[in-house]
Image (cartoon, helix red, strand yellow):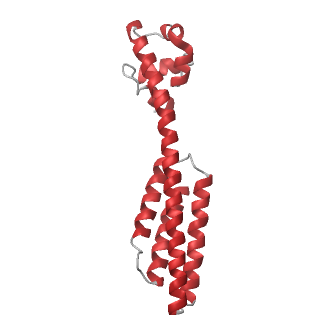
Amino acid sequence: MDSHVKELTRLRGIGPVLSRRLIEAGLDSFDAILKGGEERLTAVRGLNPRWIPSILSQAAAMKSGAEGDREQALLEMRNRIDSLAVTVQDLAACVKDLRGSEGAGAVGAKVEAEIFRVLALLDRLRASMGRKMKRTGKGLGRAAKNLASLEGAGAAEIRKGLKKSRKSLERIFA
């Protein structure tokens, strides 16, 4: 099913057949329906004139709701990315303390490299906000879950957790 058809069938009273007719008439989005108004809707074959006011009000509600919801979701994603970056930076400080006391050596260097990779991925995510919202949310959730379990862990465990978090963030771009 075409994305425009799927979008228009969200309106009550419009099924797949009627949505295809609306698309043929040039009314392929909620915005186009609102701009076209009653005149263009009455020209569509099979559309009951009694439904037109209801369809126009639903289209207006869906258009305003979609824009507001998307902006809210983007803001929420940015906040999640920022909190994840703060968590990773806290882990970096924790690893520096471990390196000083244990002399972790090669493991500590690998952990620092993993931290830089995760931070680079978070910057890349911040730059490409707005695409793949559902996948981004799931990936950020997995990464946060992996990072939350690293509290009080040693250098090797932190490295493993960071690697798992990095992999879940990389899947967003796949």
Q: Quadrant of the C terminus?
A: bottom right
Q: How many marks?
A: 0
Query: Foreground: 80 or 18?
Result: 80
* x then y, percent, for residue 56: 46, 16
Query: Foreground: 161 or 21?
Result: 161
* Residue at x 47% of width, y 58% of height: 140
Side of 86 relative to 124 (left or right): left
Work out whether residue 104 can be spotted: no
Side of 54 relative to 128 (left or right): left
Placement of 62 over or under 86, stated as above or below: above
* Residue at x 50% of width, y 63% of height: 84
Work out whether residue 18 can be spotted: yes
Q: Quadrant of the N terminus?
A: top left
* x then y, percent, for residue 138: 43, 55
Query: Foreground: 95 or 23?
Result: 95
Placement of 19 over or under 66, stated as above or below: above
Residue 25 sits in quarter: top right
* Residue at x 53% of width, y 21% of height: 23
Placement of 136 over or under 64, stated as above or below: below
* x then y, percent, for residue 93: 54, 77
* x then y, percent, for residue 5: 47, 28
* Residue at x 49% of width, y 27% of height: 63
